[in-house]
Image: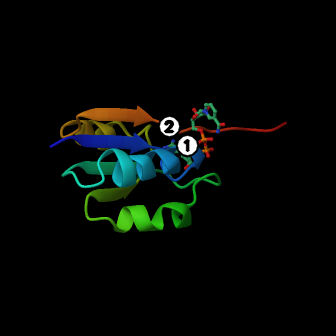
Amino acid sequence: MKTYLVTGAAGFIGANYIKYLLEKKYQNDDIKVIVLDLLTYAGNLGTIKNDIDDKRCVFVRGDIRDRDLVNGLFATTTLIMWLTSLQKVM
Ligand SMILES: NC(=O)c1ccc[n+]([C@@H]2O[C@H](COP(=O)([O-])OP(=O)(O)OC[C@H]3O[C@@H](n4cnc5c(N)ncnc54)[C@H](O)[C@@H]3O)[C@@H](O)[C@H]2O)c1
């Protein structure tokens, strides 16, 4: 079974990516999608509510700078998509 770790999945690109994984690419397949997001101003849990309700999906609120957390998630992960970002408009 493949396990995807998708960081920043409560953001624009990540939310669309996990929908693609769960609803299209692996619609009927046994995969696990771990969503890691800090839920900053840019993260919106509402946009991925249906996805994280999917039993194949696990939501973790956390920071990609948390080495212990990320190393723990790496241990079970097949593929990682880094989609976090921190943008500032001056
Ligand atoms: N949106 C675009 O059109 C576009 C185009 C090309 C490339 N990209 C790139 O894709 C990536 C994602 O873009 P986006 O538009 O989805 O961004 P976004 O701002 O919509 O989402 C970023 C997500 O990252 C999360 N996040 C921020 N810091 C975090 C941290 N330290 N730990 C965990 N989560 C954290 C936020 O809570 C948010 O959910 C960026 O690297 C961006 O440069 C975006």
Residue 52 % position (x, y): 38, 63
Residue 4 % position (x, y): 30, 41
Q: Are marks 2 and 1 in contact (CB under 8 Å)?
A: yes
- The residue singled out by tag 1 in the image is 13
> Residue sitting at 46 percent across and 44 percent down?
17
Q: Which mark is residue 83?
A: 2
Mark 1 lies on a secondary structure that is helix
> Residue sitting at 63 percent across and 39 percent down?
86
Name the amino acid, label 1. Answer: Ile
**Image height of 41 relative to 81, above or below:** below
Residue 16 appears anywhere in the view: yes
Name the amino acid, label 2. Answer: Leu
Choose the circle earlier in sequence order: 2 or 1. 1
Confirm or reject: label 1 Cβ below 8 Å from ligand 1: yes
- Residue lying farthest right? 90
- Asked where in the image residue 64 lies, by quadrant, the reply is top left
**Image height of 35 relative to 77, above or below:** below
Residue 62 appears anywhere in the view: no
Q: Residues within 10 Å of mark 2 (few under 14, many from 20)?
A: some
Quadrant of the rendered image holding ligand 1:
top right
